[in-house]
Image: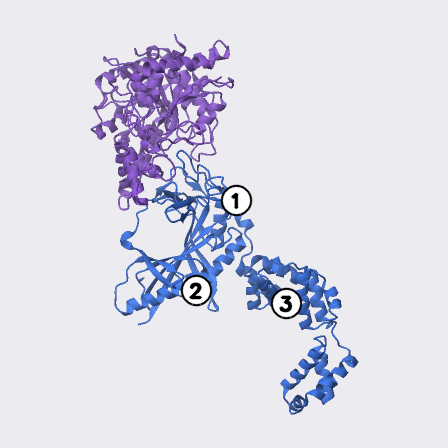
Chain colours: A blue, B purple
């Protein structure tokens, strides 16, 4: 039988507000344990929460970017459960009146667009962190009360790769909104997945598994891939699927049972009486809407149109908002008509340099004008493309100008026919076989001969001129 | 008269004219406490050695006048234990907003905390981990609760005035039982920041005082918007002492018929009727009104209050502060700590509330209770469209004997039958002394007004008080 995979994702996103969701404590990461705390986030008796307006703004931003309907009336609820990282033994969250519902996210997956439904996005507070040592367990409450957004997708994803692409797109948008660092290693982005299989064509959902403990997008994909195989085996053996929560074990590459449905908790949700129902009217939404940046999908379309870029190139550029902004300024400042000339440099050699240096385009120490100068040398055929790449590396290493480096390296391209004639003569004499091949009509042989001339001229010869000269000489 | 017997406004006159200093008031109080508190037990001895150290400099409106605080209001540097074993040794590093306001006005926080039912769960102060407080008028009777310590301290002149908290009558009922003035302000009038929560949507801090003028004064000092409490309301605080005119001519007073039914002690009833006649003789227009959903108030209250309490009290788990039982693992620690740390009534209410919020029961209990709550509120809204205030008994009986109702929680819960609706509706109400039973136990008259109309309460209560002498009679101790 053929099975269809049904995946829904729950993403938890720490907002990058300066202060916590319900108190004035700093949200700085990496501070000594229990230093970003106060009576409110420690849940001390008598303390009361007051919600953070900045977090609310970020939440509205996110809801708008994900095309959600923002509820006019929203409230906070208490989710009750006992755990030492939860100082009040309840979490302030949102239950039946979440901030927003019914949105969608358009993603590119498997070469084509797909619309993924967003069930709800709500605001809640983060819990603390437990550190287990030999005989004791310690609690760090620095993270307690940091605002979290929960983004719940519809079960619209039908392949582990799609889940991966959804997450990449989601992260990309959030980066554009600048509301979170989306760092899975630091825990500012966490993802749980629900997955079930059903016979192809059947409408009813199968028994689902909830997957936790994935620490990267790849982890999500790998865990889902493992689950597809595991569940397929169970279904094919006609065994009964058990609804359960499973943990991804990255070391072993398997999922293991955490708890079954029988262990499901009753969270006894009820409206938090310390926080009143609040109204999100136009006066709150409109200003946020006005500050909403151009989102990746729109930016991509615009770059393609304005600068005649291919979809492939534009997609690479918009993967990072700041890189896209850097690239756009470069293209605007580039005096040539064909913006593709500089775009190729940005996406090619410069992106490669950035990756090598574990940086991004916009963080490289490079003067845009110098990059444009360098491309100018190539365009005017004053240096070879090959030499230009070397110069680019040196520019990034030393901070010197393109012109200075070209002069220092004596890299001016030799286009002078007299100067090249002698080298060409030598190469022809030394490569009788290739000369014969060329005369027999093999085009590759010309390329080889040009390459030999380039080598002898330490890359300074103009390959186009060399090619023409060889052809002339041998015709 | 000794200084400790005077009202706050009388003492403030003397402090202002430098006739006395706050040190002499403290001395007078400590002598009184030494003499009578072994009998009354209004204060709890949970502070270790207490220093009666008056402030060096008298300043502000209050010039160092001491104020007594219930054990559930956070006072920095003083243990705040809600009279529960589970908060043993808890000394908050912060002041409640009301304490902060009082300190800024020049008050001295009295260094002993007033006794109460554990976590304010009770109507008799018998549920205190430190043992019961006695009624100063009759020592084998309860002082009411849960602010029984605050009420008894004021009644026995062991305090000049005091703060209590009122979730279902916990200020008004003990005020009635002890013959003092007790005010529950409008929900949102006084900040709850630093009040250890019982039921967050009902709790409100308020004054217990010897007369109405002190009540108006203290209410003015603690009221006002607090950005640290999302449920406090941003509305300016009037000068409440200006409403002490004594004139209630033409005032329209409603008498709710549902408060004069079976269960109301006949002696209390006749005392209340006399008080209503007095108001009439002062020019008020008296008319019977109906609050038809009154009969649901007690069940609705015990669902909402216990549901909120079950969640509010979850934080007492032995992890960060207070009592922690020795145990081998986490679950055991939670269980043992809470089994040993909470008293019987606290456990009963946590269980009730947990049940009411449980999956499958939420709609039938909690959600339905919320709906009835809004009907109860509408009852009041309707009456206040026509009437300036509502007058009724504070409690169906005078103080009962210690131990009389401890075995019957339902009977105990009915002690609050006349006070609970006010909390559910969020309106303000005051209890003023209006006479005695044949046994010599005080009876309180309850006045209710629409939200943020505390002035109406002070105006009516003051007019009544100034034309009677009940507040001047003191218990013999």
**Which mark identifies residue A345?**
3
Point out the tag, 2 or 3, that comes first from the N-terminus: 2
Where is residue B178 drawn, in percent x and y? 31, 18
Give the image quarter of residue A387: bottom right
Q: Spot the residue most to the top.
A: B1
Q: Residue drawn 74% across and 86% down? A: A425
Q: Mark 2 and mark 3, same subunit?
A: yes
Label 3 neighbour load within 10 Å: few <14, some 14-19, many 20+ = some
Where is residue A423 drawn, in percent x and y? 74, 82
How far apart are the two marked residues, 2 and 3, measured between alpha carbons? Answer: 31 Å
How far apart are the two marked residues, 1 and 2, measured between alpha carbons? Answer: 33 Å
The one nearer the camera, B213 or B272, is B213
How far apart are the two marked residues, 1 and 3, measured between alpha carbons? Answer: 38 Å
**Which mark identifies residue A18?**
1
Point out the tag, 1 or 2, that comes first from the N-terminus: 1
The one nearer the camera, B295 or A261, is A261
Q: Residue drawn 39% across and 15% down? A: B30
Where is residue B410 drawn, in percent x and y? 22, 30
Point out the tag, 1 or 3, that comes first from the N-terminus: 1
User: Would you say residue B198 is visible in this rendering?
Assistant: no
């Amino acid at each position: 039988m053929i099975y269809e995979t049904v995946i829904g994702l729950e993403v938890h996103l720490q907002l990058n507000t300066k202060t916590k969701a319900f108190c004035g404590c700093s949200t700085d990461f990496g501070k000594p344990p229990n230093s970003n705390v106060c009576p409110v986030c420690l849940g001390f008796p008598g303390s009361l929460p007051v919600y953070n307006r900045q977090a609310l703004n970020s939440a509205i931003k996110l809801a708008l970017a994900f095309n959600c309907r923002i509820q006019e009336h929203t409230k906070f609820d208490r989710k009750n459960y006992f755990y030492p990282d939860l100082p009040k033994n309840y979490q302030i969250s949102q239950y039946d009146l979440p901030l927003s519902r019914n949105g969608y996210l358009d993603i590119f997956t498997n070469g084509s667009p797909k619309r993924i439904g967003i069930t709800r996005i709500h605001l809640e507070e983060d819990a603390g962190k437990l550190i287990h040592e030999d005989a004791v367990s310690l609690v760090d409450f620095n993270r307690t009360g940091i605002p979290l957004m929960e983004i719940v997708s519809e079960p619209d994803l039908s392949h582990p790769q799609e889940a991966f692409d959804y997450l990449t797109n989601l992260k990309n948008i959030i980066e554009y909104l600048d509301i979170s660092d989306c760092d899975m290693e630091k825990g500012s982005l966490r993802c749980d997945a629900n997955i079930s299989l059903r016979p192809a064509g059947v409408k009813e959902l199968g028994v689902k598994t909830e997957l936790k403990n994935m620490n990267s997008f790849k982890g999500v994909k790998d865990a889902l891939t493992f689950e597809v195989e595991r569940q397929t085996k169970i279904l094919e053996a006609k065994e009964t699927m058990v609804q359960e929560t499973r943990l991804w074990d990255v070391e072993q590459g398997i999922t293991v049972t955490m708890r079954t449905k029988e262990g499901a908790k009753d969270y006894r949700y009820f409206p938090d009486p310390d926080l009143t129902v609040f109204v999100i009217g136009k006066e709150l939404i409109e200003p946020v809407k006005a500050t909403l940046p151009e989102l990746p999908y729109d930016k991509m379309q615009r770059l393609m149109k304005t600068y005649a870029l291919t979809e492939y190139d534009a997609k690479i550029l918009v993967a990072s908002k700041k890189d896209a902004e850097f690239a756009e300024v470069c293209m605007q400042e580039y005096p040539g008509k064909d913006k593709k000339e500089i775009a190729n440099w940005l996406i090619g050699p410069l992106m490669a340099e950035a990756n090598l240096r574990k940086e991004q385009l916009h963080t490289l120490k490079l003067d845009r004008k110098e990059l444009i100068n360098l491309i100018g040398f190539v365009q005017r055929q004053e240096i070879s493309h090959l030499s230009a790449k070397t110069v680019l590396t040196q520019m990034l290493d030393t901070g010197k100008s393109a012109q200075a480096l070209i002069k220092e390296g004596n890299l001016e391209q030799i286009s002078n026919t007299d100067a090249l004639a002698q080298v060409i003569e030598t190469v022809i004499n030394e490569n009788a076989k290739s000369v014969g091949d060329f005369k027999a009509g093999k085009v590759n042989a010309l390329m080889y001969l040009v390459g030999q001339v380039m080598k002898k001229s330490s890359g300074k010869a103009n390959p186009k001129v060399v090619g023409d000269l060889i052809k002339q000489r041998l015709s | 008269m000794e200084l400790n017997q005077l009202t706050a406004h009388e003492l403030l006159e003397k402090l202002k004219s430098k006739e006395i200093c706050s040190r002499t008031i403290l001395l007078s109080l400590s002598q009184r406490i030494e003499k009578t508190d072994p009998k009354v037990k209004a204060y709890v001895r949970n502070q270790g050695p207490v220093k009666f150290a008056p402030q060096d400099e008298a300043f502000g409106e209050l010039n160092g006048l001491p104020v007594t605080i219930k054990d559930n209001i956070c006072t920095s540097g003083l243990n705040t234990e809600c009279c529960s074993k589970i908060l043993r040794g808890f000394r908050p590093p912060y002041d409640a907003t009301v304490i902060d306001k009082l300190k800024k006005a020049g008050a001295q926080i009295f260094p002993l905390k007033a006794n109460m039912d554990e976590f304010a769960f009770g109507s008799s102060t018998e549920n205190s981990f430190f043992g019961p407080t006695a009624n100063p008028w009759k020592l084998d009777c309860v002082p009411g609760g849960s602010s029984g310590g605050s009420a008894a301290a004021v009644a026995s002149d062991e305090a000049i005035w005091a703060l209590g908290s009122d979730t279902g009558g916990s200020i008004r009922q003990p005020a009635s039982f002890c013959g003092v003035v007790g005010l529950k302000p409008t929900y949102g009038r006084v900040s709850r920041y630093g009040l250890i929560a019982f039921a967050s949507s009902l709790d409100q801090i308020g004054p217990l005082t010897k007369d109405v003028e002190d009540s108006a004064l203290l209410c003015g000092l603690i009221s006002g918007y607090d950005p640290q409490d999302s449920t406090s309301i941003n509305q300016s605080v009037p000068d409440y002492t200006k409403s002490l005119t004594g004139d209630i001519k033409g005032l329209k007073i409603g008498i709710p018929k549902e408060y004069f039914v079976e269960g109301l002690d006949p002696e209390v009833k006749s005392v209340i009727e006399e008080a209503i006649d007095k108001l009439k003789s002062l020019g008020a227009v008296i008319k019977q009104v109906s609050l038809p959903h009154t009969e649901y108030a007690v069940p609705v209250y015990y669902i909402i209050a216990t549901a909120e309490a079950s969640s509010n009290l979850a934080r007492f788990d032995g992890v960060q502060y207070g009592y922690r039982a020795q145990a081998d693992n986490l679950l055991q620690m939670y269980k043992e700590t809470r089994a040993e740390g909470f008293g019987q009534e606290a456990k009963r209410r946590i269980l009730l509330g947990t049940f009411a919020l449980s999956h499958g029961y939420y709609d039938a209990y909690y959600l339905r209770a919320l709906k009835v709550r809004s009907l109860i509120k509408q009852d009041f809204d309707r009456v206040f469209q026509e009437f300036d205030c509502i007058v009724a008994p504070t409690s169906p009986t005078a103080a009962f004997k210690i131990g009389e109702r401890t075995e019957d929680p339902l009977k105990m819960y009915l002690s609050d039958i006349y006070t609970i609706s006010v909390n559910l509706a969020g309106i303000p109400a005051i209890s003023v002394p209006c006479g005695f039973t044949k046994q010599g136990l005080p009876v309180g008259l309850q006045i209710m007004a629409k939200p943020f109309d505390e002035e109406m309460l002070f105006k009516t209560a003051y007019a009544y008080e100034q034309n009677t002498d009940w507040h001047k009679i003191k218990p013999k101790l």
